[in-house]
Image (spheres, coloured by chain):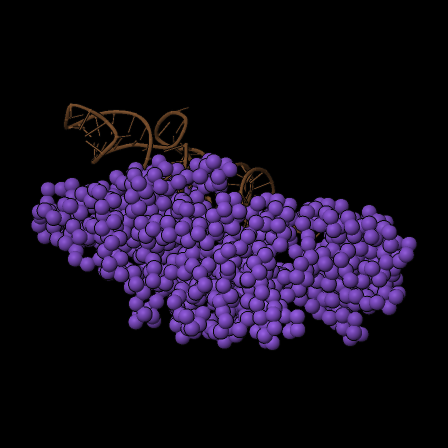
Chain colours: A purple, B brown
RNA sequence: GCGGAUGUGGCGAAAUUGGCAGACGCGCUAGACUUAGGAUCUAGUGUCUUCGACAUGGGAGUUCGAGUCUCUUCAUCCGCACCA
C-alpha cells in the first residue's frame, strides 16, 4: 500500500471539502476538544508533539463519530524567551524565526492528518490577538486586579530578567539553570490571591487528575489560624500569624523576618552592629540556602522586648531568616516546646522552653511535642484540647482588640512584568502629571516595534526604543513614557481557549453570546508540567472575566487529561545535552502518519508514557496489511447466507469489541482499545478459515472493523471505506453501536475451584440459578475426582465468574 | 521532611475494580508454503525437574478467594520545600 499517496489524497479531500469545519448550527451539540497549543521554539515537530496531538486527534475523531459536533482548533503560543534567546545567539529576529517555525509546524500538523479546524487558528504574537490580551489587562486594571508594587523579585543573573516563583527551580533559573538572586523592582502584579478560596473550592467540581488537583491545592496552601498582636516596650505593635494559638502560653520569644519594617526601630544601640551584619548576610544568601529545611536556625537579638498578650510576660524580640517576610505577617511567635523549628532556635540561642501541651492519652510526649493535645500551664485554658483552645484564645484576644481569627494562603499574586522584548506590551503610560494612565481601549493594540536592540544588558529592550517609549498621556495629552516591560507569556495563554471560538472578532476579545455556549472546554489535553502555572492562571482569568460580566461559567476546563511523557530510549527525559532525542521524521517517512500514530497509541499507556522503543512499529504495519487483505476480500467474497453458530460466535466478538473499544476510547485507554480490535481481526481470520462463509455478514463485519479503526488510522480507513464502495468520508458515519442481543449467550464456561485452586471448567446455561450452577459443579466428573473423599463444607457461586468449593 | 504516584514474564503492557494473573503485541522456538524470506500461515512460549508446585518489589494481615483491601518495609519517579 502506498501510504504517501493515500495520505496526501485524503488530506487534500478533507481540506477541499472542509470536512472538519465546525458547524455553528449544531452549537447545542458541541464538543470542545482542546490540546494545549504549541510553542514554536523548534522548527520541527518532535516525538512529544506527535504523542500529544496524534492520539487526542483520534479521540476527537471518535467523539465526532459518536455524533458530537467537534470543535478542535489549533494555534501557537508564539511569544517568549526561547525565540528571543535564539535571536540573541543568531541575530535572526524573533518575529522572523517564530513565523517561519509556525509555517513549518502548520504544514507538519496537517501532514499528521489531524482534524483541526484551521479557520480558528490563533497566533499570540500577532496584533489581532495581543490587542485583546492588552484589553484584558486593562479590564483587570480597572477592576483593581492589576497593580504595581515594588517587591523583591527573583532575578536571573544570566537571562537578566525577573522570574516568577514558579519558574525558579531549586534556587536556579528554570530555563538556563543559573543562580537566581533577589532584586527590588517595581512590577505589575495580577491579584490572583483574591480568588484563592474559590480556586481552592472549585477544584472539587473538576474532572481532573487527582494529582493535579492536589498540587494546586498545595500551591494555594490554605491554612486557618489567628493573628495575635504584641505590644513592644517601645509602644510599637505588630502581629504574628499562628495556627497554634493554643500554645500561646509557651511563647518565650518572637522572631521578625529580617526585612520586617519594625526591625530598624526596635534594634537597640548595643545590638545595631550585629543586626546590620546579619541583615547583610541574609540579603546575600537568601532564597538560595533558604531552600534547605535542615539548615541551622540562625538569628540575632534586637535588644528589644515585647509582651505576650495572653499572660503579659516579657519576651525578647529576635530576627531570623527562617521567618519569611512574604508569608503571614512576616513575624512569628516562638514556642520552642511545641514546634520543631522554634525548638532548634531556642536550643541554639539559649532561650527558655516552657511546656504548655500534654498528650491527650498520656502517651510519650517528649519535647518538642508538635502533636495536638491538652493545654497545661495555660491559666484558665488548662484542660482544653488543642482544637478548642486554638479558637478560644484568639476569641478572647479579639475581645481585647489584640487578635482575630485569620486564614492565610501561600498563593502569591502573579508577577507579570518581564524585562524582555518578545512579549505582549503593557498598555500603560506614565505621565509626569497624571501618573500611571491606561491606554485608551480605542488605541489598542500598543504595537510591539520591530526594530529594537534586544541584547540583554539588565534593562528592558524597549527602553532603548525611543519612538516606542515616547508617547502622549491619554488623559492630559502631554508627553509621556510607555511601560518598557512586556507581559509574561502565561498571560497570553491564560485566555486563548476563549478566543478560539471567536478568533476573528475585531470588535471584541470574544462575543459572550458565542463563548458562553462554546465553553467550557469539554476535554483538555496537555502536559502535567502546567499543573500550577498555566492551569491555575487560566482558571483565575476565567473567574475574573466572569466577575467582570463577560462570561457566565466558572471553570474553563471541565475535564482534563495529561498525556504521559515519551522518554529517550535510555529511560531519561529527552534532551539535547543528553543526546537521547528521537526524531520521529524517519519513522514518518518510512511508515507514514497512520502507522506511526497507531504505534504511539498502542505501544504506550497514554497517561503513563515511557521510554521510546521502535521495535513494535513494524508489527503495526503488518497489522494494517492484515486488515487490508480482509478489506480487499470483500470485493470478491463468495458464500451463503446462513447464520449459524460460527456466525453467532463472530458476531459476539464483533459486538463485544465495539462495546469495549467504545468504553476504552472514552477513558483514553487507546492501547487496550487497539488490542480489542486486534482480537477482533484474529477472530475474523478464524471465521474465514472455512469452506463456506456468510458473505453479507462478512462484509458487515469488515465495515464495522473499518469504522472501529477510523479514528486510529484516519487516512487508511478512508481508503478502505472507498475500496468497499463508500462514497462519502468515513468520518461522516456513526461509530458502530453494540447490539446487546448479540452478547447474550446460551451457555458459558466457568472455572471451578476447590479450596481456591482451579480444578475444572464447566459449561452452564446462561440462565442457570446459583443452585443449578452448584449442582452442575458438584456433579462434574473432574470435580468429583478432585474432591475425592473430602467433605464439602461450603460452596461459593459467583455467576459469570467462578465456583469455589471449600472442602476438607 | 510533606504531598502524589509507580513497582507484574526476555520487552511494551493487560486484568470487567476482591473472582480463571500475564489479554494484545514485540521477541524467541519449532514447523508449513517457498528459488528465496526481514512475506504469509500453523503451533509453542511466566518460573521450576514430572504428577504438580511456585509466581504480581520484600514481610505480615483481612477473606472461601488478594496484583487489587489493611499494616509494614524497600526501591524508583514527580511535585513542594523553614508557610509559623
**Quarter residue A790 falls in:** top left
B9 up-or-down from A661: above or below: above
Q: Nearer the viewer, residue A155 or A57?
A: A155
Question: Relative to A789, does residue A388 appear above or below in the rendering?
Answer: below
Please give the name of the residue rendered at 50% of the width and 59% of the height, measured from the top-left corner. Answer: A449
**Quadrant where the N terminus of chain A is found in the figure:** top left
Q: Position of residue A521 (x, y in %)?
A: 42, 64
Seen at 36% across and 57% down, the residue is A666
> Is A10 on the left-hand or right-hand side of A93?
left
Nearer-the-camera pick, B64 or A606: A606
How many numbered marks are there? Answer: 0
* Residue A167 seen by the camera: yes
Q: Is residue A387 visible?
A: no
Q: Quadrant of residue A245?
A: bottom right
Residue A254 vertical position relative to residue A441 in the rendered view, above or below = above
The residue shown at (14%, 48%) is A634
Task: Report whether B18 appears left or right of A398.
Answer: left
Looking at this view, is A179 or A160 the one in front?
A160
Amino acid at each position: 500500500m502506498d501510504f504517501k499517496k493515500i495520505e496526501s489524497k485524503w488530506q487534500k479531500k478533507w481540506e477541499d471539502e472542509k470536512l472538519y469545519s465546525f458547524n455553528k448550527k449544531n452549537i447545542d451539540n458541541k464538543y470542545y476538544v482542546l490540546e494545549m497549543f504549541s510553542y514554536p521554539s523548534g522548527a520541527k515537530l518532535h516525538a512529544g508533539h506527535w504523542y500529544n496531538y496524534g492520539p487526542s486527534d483520534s479521540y476527537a475523531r471518535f467523539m465526532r463519530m459518536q455524533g458530537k459536533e467537534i470543535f478542535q482548533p489549533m494555534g501557537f503560543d508564539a511569544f517568549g524567551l526561547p525565540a528571543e534567546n535564539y535571536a540573541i545567539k543568531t541575530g535572526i529576529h524573533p518575529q522572523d524565526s517564530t513565523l517561519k517555525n509556525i509555517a513549518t509546524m502548520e504544514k507538519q500538523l496537517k501532514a499528521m492528518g489531524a482534524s483541526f479546524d484551521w479557520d480558528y487558528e490563533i497566533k499570540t504574537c500577532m496584533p489581532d490577538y495581543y490587542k485583546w490580551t492588552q484589553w484584558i489587562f486593562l479590564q483587570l486594571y480597572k477592576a483593581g486586579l492589576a497593580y504595581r508594587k515594588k517587591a523583591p523579585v527573583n532575578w536571573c543573573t544570566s537571562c537578566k530578567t525577573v522570574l516568577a516563583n514558579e519558574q525558579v527551580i531549586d534556587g536556579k533559573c528554570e530555563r538556563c539553570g543559573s543562580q537566581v538572586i533577589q532584586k527590588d523592582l517595581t512590577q505589575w502584579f495580577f491579584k490572583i490571591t483574591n480568588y484563592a478560596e474559590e480556586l481552592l473550592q472549585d477544584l472539587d467540581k473538576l474532572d481532573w487528575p487527582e494529582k493535579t488537583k492536589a498540587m494546586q491545592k498545595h500551591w494555594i496552601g490554605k491554612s486557618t489560624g489567628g493573628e495575635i498582636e504584641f505590644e513592644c516596650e517601645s509602644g510599637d505593635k505588630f502581629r504574628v500569624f499562628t495556627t497554634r494559638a493554643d500554645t500561646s502560653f509557651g511563647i518565650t520569644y518572637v522572631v521578625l523576618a529580617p526585612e520586617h519594617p519594625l526591625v530598624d526601630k526596635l534594634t537597640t544601640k548595643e545590638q545595631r552592629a550585629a543586626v546590620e551584619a546579619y541583615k547583610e548576610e541574609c540579603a546575600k544568601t537568601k532564597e538560595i540556602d533558604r531552600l534547605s529545611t535542615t539548615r541551622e536556625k540562625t538569628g540575632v537579638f534586637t535588644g528589644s522586648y515585647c509582651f505576650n498578650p495572653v499572660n503579659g510576660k516579657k519576651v525578647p524580640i529576635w530576627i531570623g531568616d527562617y521567618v519569611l517576610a512574604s508569608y503571614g505577617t512576616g513575624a512569628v511567635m516562638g514556642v520552642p516546646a511545641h514546634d520543631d523549628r522554634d525548638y532548634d532556635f531556642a536550643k541554639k540561642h539559649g532561650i527558655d522552653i516552657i511546656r504548655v501541651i500534654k498528650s491527650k492519652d498520656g502517651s510519650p510526649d517528649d519535647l518538642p511535642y508538635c502533636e495536638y493535645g491538652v493545654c497545661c500551664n495555660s491559666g484558665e485554658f488548662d484542660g482544653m484540647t488543642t482544637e478548642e483552645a486554638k479558637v478560644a484564645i484568639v476569641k478572647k484576644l479579639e475581645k481585647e482588640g489584640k487578635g482575630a481569627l485569620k486564614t492565610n494562603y501561600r498563593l502569591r499574586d502573579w508577577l507579570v512584568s518581564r524585562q524582555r522584548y518578545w512579549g505582549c506590551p503593557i498598555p500603560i503610560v506614565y505621565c509626569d502629571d497624571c501618573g500611571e494612565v491606561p491606554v485608551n481601549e480605542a488605541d489598542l493594540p500598543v504595537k510591539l516595534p520591530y526594530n529594537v536592540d534586544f541584547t540583554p544588558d539588565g534593562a528592558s529592550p524597549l527602553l532603548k526604543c525611543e519612538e516606542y517609549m515616547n508617547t502622549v498621556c491619554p488623559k492630559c495629552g502631554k508627553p509621556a513614557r510607555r511601560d518598557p516591560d512586556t507581559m509574561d507569556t502565561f498571560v497570553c495563554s491564560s485566555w486563548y481557549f476563549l478566543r478560539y471560538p471567536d478568533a476573528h472578532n475585531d470588535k471584541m476579545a470574544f462575543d459572550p453570546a458565542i463563548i458562553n455556549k462554546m465553553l467550557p472546554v469539554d476535554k483538555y489535553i496537555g502536559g502535567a508540567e502546567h499543573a500550577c502555572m498555566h492551569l491555575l492562571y487560566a482558571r483565575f482569568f476565567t473567574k475574573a472575566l466572569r466577575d467582570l460580566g463577560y462570561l457566565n461559567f466558572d471553570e474553563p476546563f471541565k475535564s482534563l487529561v495529561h498525556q504521559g511523557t515519551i522518554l529517550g530510549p535510555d529511560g531519561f527525559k529527552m534532551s539535547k545535552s543528553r543526546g537521547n532525542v528521537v526524531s520521529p521524521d524517519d519513522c514518518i517517512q518510512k511508515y507514514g502518519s497512520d502507522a506511526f500514530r497507531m504505534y504511539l497509541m498502542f505501544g504506550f499507556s497514554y497517561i503513563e508514557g515511557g521510554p521510546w522503543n521502535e521495535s513494535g512499529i513494524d508489527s503495526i504495519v503488518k497489522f494494517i496489511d492484515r486488515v487490508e487483505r480482509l478489506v480487499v476480500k470483500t470485493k470478491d467474497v463468495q458464500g451463503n447466507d446462513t447464520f449459524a453458530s460460527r456466525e453467532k460466535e463472530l458476531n459476539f466478538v464483533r459486538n463485544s469489541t465495539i462495546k469495549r473499544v467504545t468504553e476504552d476510547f472514552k477513558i483514553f485507554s487507546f492501547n487496550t482499545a487497539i488490542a480489542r480490535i486486534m482480537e477482533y481481526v484474529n477472530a475474523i481470520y478464524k471465521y474465514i478459515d472455512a469452506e463456506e462463509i456468510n458473505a453479507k455478514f462478512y462484509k458487515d463485519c469488515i465495515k464495522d472493523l473499518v469504522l472501529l479503526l477510523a479514528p486510529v488510522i484516519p487516512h487508511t480507513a478512508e481508503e478502505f471505506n472507498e475500496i468497499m464502495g463508500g462514497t462519502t468520508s468515513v468520518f461522516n458515519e456513526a461509530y458502530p453501536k453494540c447490539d446487546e442481543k448479540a452478547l447474550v449467550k446460551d451457555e458459558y464456561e466457568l472455572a471451578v475451584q476447590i479450596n481456591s485452586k482451579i480444578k475444572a471448567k464447566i459449561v452452564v446455561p446462561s440462565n442457570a440459578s446459583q443452585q443449578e450452577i452448584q449442582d452442575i459443579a458438584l456433579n462434574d466428573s473432574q470435580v468429583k475426582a478432585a474432591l475425592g473423599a473430602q467433605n464439602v463444607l461450603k460452596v461459593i457461586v459467583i455467576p459469570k465468574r467462578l465456583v469455589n468449593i471449600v472442602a476438607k
